[in-house]
Every structure is written in C-alpha cells, then in structure tokens.
C-alpha cells in the first residue's frame, strides 16, 4: 500500500490537529439555561439522575467523540489517496496483437476431449487477463492480425469495451499479416507512457510472419510474445483442380493433392463430388510429411462444380477444418471461332481445321471483312494474294507473310532465303509438341528480324523462320508457303494446326476458372469467361451470399476473397450486362496448414517471453479514497439516525 496524495507525515499532522480540535470541543462544559419553576424541591427529585445513568451519559459522550475521530481518520486517509502497488506503478499503454491466422483454429495444449480449446480461445483468455489487470492510468488497444489487419477495440482504459472487442476475434482462412499489425501497434502506443506490444500467437508463421516478429523484438517499442501452441497433427488438401482433356474435350479429369503435415501417420478418406453427386472416394494412408496426388479420370464434361472433402475416424488427425475442403469450377466450353482466309488451293489446311470437329467453328472469310476481330483466331494462307492492309485485332497466324515487300505484317523481314533448311526448333514450346520438322523440303522462304519479346520457334541455319510474338493477342508468322513445301503431307502439319488451336484456346475467355485465397487480387474478365468490352462494373457474390460491386479498369477488377468457395461474377453494364461466370477460390498456401511453431528455431531473447498477466486491481470502478468517503458518509448517516432516535443525545 502506498499513498498517492499527501505523505504519511502530512496526514499525521492533519489528523493530530483535527483530533485535538474535536477533543477540545468535547471538553467544553455545556451551559444550561436557567428556568424559574415553582416548588424547585419537587422538580429536583424528579430530575435527579441515578449513578448508572450518569455513567451511561459519560460513555455515550465518549462514543460520540470516537465516532468523530473515526470520521476524521477516514477523511484524512481519503486525502492521502491510498493505492495498491498495482495502481501506483508507472502508467502502461499496451497494444495487444492477436494472431488470427488459420493455424490458430488448431487445438491448444490445454485442450481435452471433454473441453476442447482452440489456440485462438487460449489467446483470447490471455488477452482478457491482460485487460483485467490494467490499472486506472493504464490503457490498451486490441489489434487483430489476419490477412486484413483490423482493430477489435480502440485505445481505451474501458475494460468492458476492451473485453467485448476480444470476444469477437475468430481465426481466418489464411496467413496473418503480422508486419502491418505490428507496425500499427507500434504507431498506436508509440507516444504514450509505458508503451509496449504484447503479441499472442501460436508461432506457426510463414517467412513474412517470422521476419515481422524479429522486427518487433528488435524495434523501438518493447515487444513481448506469449505463445499458445498445441498438437501439430494436420492433414490438408493442398491442391485441387479440374480440367478437360485436350484431346477429348467431352471428358474431364480431377486432381487432388493431400498432404500430411503432422508427425504421425494418418488415415483419411477423400471424397470428391460433382454438382452434389459423388464421383470418387479414396481411402489414403499417409506417412508423416507425405504428399499424395489422386487423379479421377474420364468424368463427364457436363459436370461443372467440383468439391473435395477429407474425413477421418479420428477427427484430431485432420486438425483445423478450414483446409479439409476445396472447390473447382470447369467453365463451359464453347467452340473456338476460327476464320480461314485462303485462296482455296491448300486443302490440307482446311482438312486439318475441319478434323478438330465440334471443338472449332470454322468460317471462310475474306481479308476485307470488318468483323474479323470478333473471331478467336484468324489464319491467313493467301498464296499469291497479298495480305489486307489492316490486320484484325485478334489472334492471327500467317503463312508466308513477306511474299510481297509492302506486307503489313508487324514482325519485320530479315532476308529472303532460297531452299531454306529447318535446322533448329523449340521442342518444349506448346506449339511444337509432337511436331518434328526435320528434313522438310521448302522451295523458298523469308527469315524474320526479332524484336525484344519475340520468340523464334524454328530456325534455318540460325535465322528465325517461324516466330511468335505474344502481346494482348498472339501473332504467329511462318516464313514459307506450305504449297511450296512438303510440310502439308507430313504428320507434323495437322499436329501443328491442332497445337495452334489449343494454344489459342488456353488464352481465350473461360480457360482459367480458379483464384487463390487473398485479401485483394486482380483478375481479368477475359480469363474468367466474360468479354471485357464495355464493362465498367461487376458484382462479386461469395459463399456468404452478400454481393459486392467492383469497378473494372482495362478489363480487370480486384476481388476480395477471404473464404474458400465458389464466387459468382456478374457484369452490371455493357453489352454483356447480366452475364455470369464462376470462379473457385481455395487456400493455395500450404504454410497456412502447417501447425508447427517456428519460434524455437528463431532463438529469441528470454526477456521477450511474456510472463503471467498482471493481477487485477482490488477495485475496478475507482480508487480506494472513494470507498473511504463512502464509509464516512455512511457513518454520518448512522449518527444522524441515532441522534434523532435520541440514542446518542
């Protein structure tokens, strides 16, 4: 106990002076009024006090004196402002940073079968204990470190408000942005007395989180860490995707990757459903650290939504449930619109395109058509005819583009070559898969002058003769006329055309239908299956069913996806207003599913380890002097009542 007001010596002087004054007043004899009455002897017999009554009057007077001294003592003590050691210490301003990453949903060390306790629950209890131990001059702020940093309770000394904010903290589905959270905490308490940061985490951090923790320990604001770990057993779905077969586009295959991130063998069941119907069920036994990939083949392409779930006889083996489910969307397949501009003499090219069946919608066109930009791919094979002056703004492939010197082809000519030999080819490029160009006989051709970004697919004695330029659209140039070669009679020719169509298909709307979990990411409308022309706004609806409007700039928009699931994107304006596409969002970071703490390997100083929470102050509503004044007021009321009841008179 200490005195925050007057010192003890000052209080003693005050009590002595006040007590002497009260005593002096009680020593004064009471002056009685003289009243003249008839027959005084009779009244003297009536009013004569007995000896016992005289003793009681003396004791009653002594009791009243003691009560007055007690009242004086209470007032003097209140002036001294007595406080416990928890209240007279220097003021403290603490920023409580709670790690709300996905791993905090894992079991805590204190968890039991009868009373399961998550790591986030243990962290919340520790944060609440810290808040309850605040003194009257202390303040705290509660910051939630998730993918998106937020403030659960602003800087305040109101314990009830701080506790209410702590109760709202729940783990998310991704990694915590500790760097921003710690920076915010430092700024929140930096200019306040006794500034310090208390970080509550399980230590299951990624590289960025570990770096942020190191920066906190070495920063200007004292930083303490309270660790809430637990069992690290966890089996998670770390990848899930569905795709069409390139060669058989009416069939699908699904790939699921499952990883055992724990330290014990685990047996789980992987169940894959398509539009609510089970299409595969696999029992998996995984060793510690083992990763298993399962492929479900030859599925009906009419299915569009896929979902994978893990289950186990021992639920503890699965750990947190956020990574036991994954989603995939297969966008609807529409035929690729291909325009062939030809003089009609190369039937081999017509046959190669027609052989692709329903996958390609082939139209014959002329170079003067104004709607060529609406096609997905335009193939020019004009033979002795020149190219049109204006090439369409779409994917184009041109055979023998520099047959005439005034060609508008965007990739410049290097030189003419008589009887070129194809000596080098980029075998790993998708356009040349299974294509062998060795020993092809060519009558004449031209080579190209490459610009930065251009890629030479085939060379003739080192000079590029087949080139690819990738920009918003691809431009493919083949520097010879198929009619002046035996290329169309080789098996490589239809394979080359099939690779070209497949390569364009992978760049057309609807090919990509998945996105990783994240706070904010830019997505292209064309990649999701919507033509961006004229679209200025889209509406994004997540698994929670709450629509959010997002602006579109240059065909791209930013999506905030914090929960795994299937999201719907709908165009709100433009020619495609009302059109909708779907995209699957999954947890794509295996670090989020790893429940092992990395703090032991970081070798942090011992002083950074947070001790127990401070003991709560004895009174939470005010200092002790208020209680003393309340007691004094009670005594005054008691004396007033006894006086009027003529007990102390």
Image: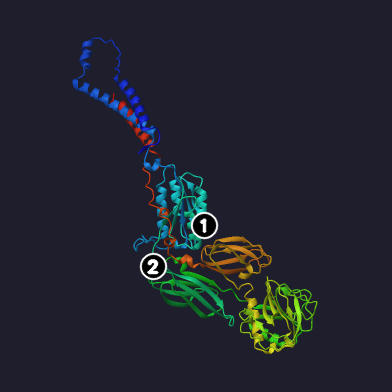
Mark 1 Cα shell of 10 Å, populated few (<14), some (14-19), many (≥20): many
Looking at the image, residue 311 lies above or below residue 114: below
Q: Quadrant of the C terminus?
A: top left
Report crowding for label 2: few under 14, some 14 to 19, many 20 or more residues within 10 A (C-alpha): some
Q: Secondary structure at mark 1?
A: helix
Q: On the rendered image, what quadrant is the N terminus found in?
A: top left
Q: Is residue 293 visible?
A: yes
Q: Residue furthest left?
A: 51
Q: Position of residue 218 (x, y in %)?
A: 48, 54
- Tell which circle, 2 or 1, labels the residue nearer the N-terminal end: 1
Q: Is residue 56 above or below residue 510?
A: above
Secondary structure under tag 2 reads helix
Please tell me which residue lies in front, 100 or 214.
214
Residue 459 position within the rendered picture, expressed as x and y whole percent measured from the top left: 68, 81
Residue 186 point in image, percent of width and height: 50, 50
| Residues under numbered marks 2 and 1 in contact, where contact means CB atoms less than 8 Å apart | no
Identify the colour scheme used: rainbow
Give the label, 2 or 1, closer to the camera: 1
Q: Residue at x 21, y 11 (%)?
A: 41
> Mark on residue 316?
2
Q: Which mark is residue 500?
A: none
Q: Is residue 355 visible?
A: no
Q: Is residue 610 above or below residue 597?
A: above
Left or right position of 577 against 189: right
Where, by quadrant of the figure, is residue 347 drawn? bottom right
Task: Identify the residue at the far front of this view.
Answer: 461
The answer to which image quadrant residue 383 occupies is bottom right
Query: What residue is pinned by disc 1?
Result: 179
Q: Is residue 249 left or right of residue 230?
A: right
- The answer to which image quadrant residue 406 occupies is bottom right
Whole-number angstrom distance, CA of label 2 to CA of label 1 = 31 Å
The spot of residue 393 in percent (x, y) is 72, 72
């Amino acid at each position: 106990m200490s005195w925050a007001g007057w010192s003890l010596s000052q209080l003693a002087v005050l009590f002595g002076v006040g007590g002497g004054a009260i005593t002096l007043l009680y020593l004064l004899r009471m002056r009685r009024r003289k009243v003249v009455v008839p027959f005084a002897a009779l009244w003297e017999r009536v009013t004569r006090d007995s000896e016992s009554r005289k003793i009681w009057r003396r004791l009653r007077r002594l009791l009243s004196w003691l009560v007055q001294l007690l009242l004086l003592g209470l007032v003097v003590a209140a002036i001294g402002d007595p406080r416990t050691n928890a209240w007279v210490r220097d003021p403290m301003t603490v920023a409580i940073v709670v790690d709300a990453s996905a791993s905090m949903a894992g079991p805590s060390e204190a968890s039991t079968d009868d009373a399961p306790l998550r790591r986030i629950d243990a962290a919340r209890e520790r944060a609440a204990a810290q808040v309850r131990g605040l003194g009257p001059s202390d303040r705290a702020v509660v910051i939630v470190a998730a993918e998106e940093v937020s403030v659960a309770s602003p800087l305040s000394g109101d314990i009830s408000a701080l506790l209410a904010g702590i109760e709202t903290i729940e783990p998310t589905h991704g990694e915590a942005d500790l760097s921003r959270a710690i920076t915010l905490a430092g700024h929140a308490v930096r200019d306040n007395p006794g500034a310090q940061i208390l970080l509550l985490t399980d230590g299951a951090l990624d590289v960025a989180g570990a770096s942020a923790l190191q920066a906190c320990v070495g920063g200007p604001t004292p930083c303490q860490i309270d660790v809430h770990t637990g069992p690290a057993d966890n089996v998670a779905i770390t990848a899930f995707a569905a795709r069409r077969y390139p060669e058989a586009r009416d069939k699908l295959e699904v790939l699921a990757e499952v990883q055992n991130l724990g330290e014990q063998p685990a047996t789980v069941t992987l169940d894959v459903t398509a539009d609510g119907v089970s299409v595969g069920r696999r029992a998996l036994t995984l060793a510690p650290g083992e990763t298993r990939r399962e492929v479900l083949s030859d599925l009906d392409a009419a299915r569009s939504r896929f979902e994978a779930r893990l289950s186990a006889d021992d639920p503890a083996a699965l750990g947190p449930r956020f990574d036991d489910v994954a989603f995939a969307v297969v966008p609807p397949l529409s035929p690729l619109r291909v325009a062939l501009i030809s003089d009609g003499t190369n039937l081999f090219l017509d046959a190669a395109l027609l052989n692709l069946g329903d996958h390609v919608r082939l139209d014959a066109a002329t170079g003067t058509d104004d709607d060529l930009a609406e096609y997905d791919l335009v193939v020019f094979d004009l033979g002795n005819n020149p190219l049109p002056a204006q090439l369409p703004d779409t994917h184009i492939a041109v055979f023998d583009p520099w047959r005439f010197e005034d060609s508008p082809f965007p990739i410049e000519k290097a030189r003419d070559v008589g009887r070129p030999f194809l000596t080098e080819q980029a075998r790993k490029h998708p356009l040349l898969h299974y294509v062998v160009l060795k020993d092809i006989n060519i009558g004449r051709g031209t080579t190209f002058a490459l610009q930065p970004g251009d890629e030479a697919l085939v060379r003739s004695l080192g000079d590029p003769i087949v080139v690819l330029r990738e920009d918003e659209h691809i431009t493919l140039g083949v520097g010879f006329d198929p009619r002046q070669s035996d290329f169309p009679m080789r098996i490589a020719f239809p394979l080359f055309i099939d690779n070209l169509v497949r390569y364009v298909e992978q760049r057309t709307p609807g090919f990509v239908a998945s996105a990783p979990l994240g706070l904010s990411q830019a997505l292209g409308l064309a990649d999701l299956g919507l033509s961006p022309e004229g679209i200025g706004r889209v509406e994004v609806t997540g698994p929670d069913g709450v629509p959010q409007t997002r602006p579109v700039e240059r065909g791209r928009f930013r999506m905030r996806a914090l929960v795994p699931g299937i999201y719907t994107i709908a165009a709100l304006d433009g020619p495609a207003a009302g059109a909708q596409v779907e995209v699957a969002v999954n947890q794509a970071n295996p670090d989020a599913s790893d429940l092992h703490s990395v703090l032991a390997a970081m070798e942090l100083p011992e002083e950074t380890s947070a001790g127990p929470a401070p003991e709560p102050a004895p009174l939470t509503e005010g200092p002790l002097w208020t209680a003393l004044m309340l007691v004094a007021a009670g005594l005054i009321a008691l004396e007033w009542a006894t006086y009027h009841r003529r007990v102390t008179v």
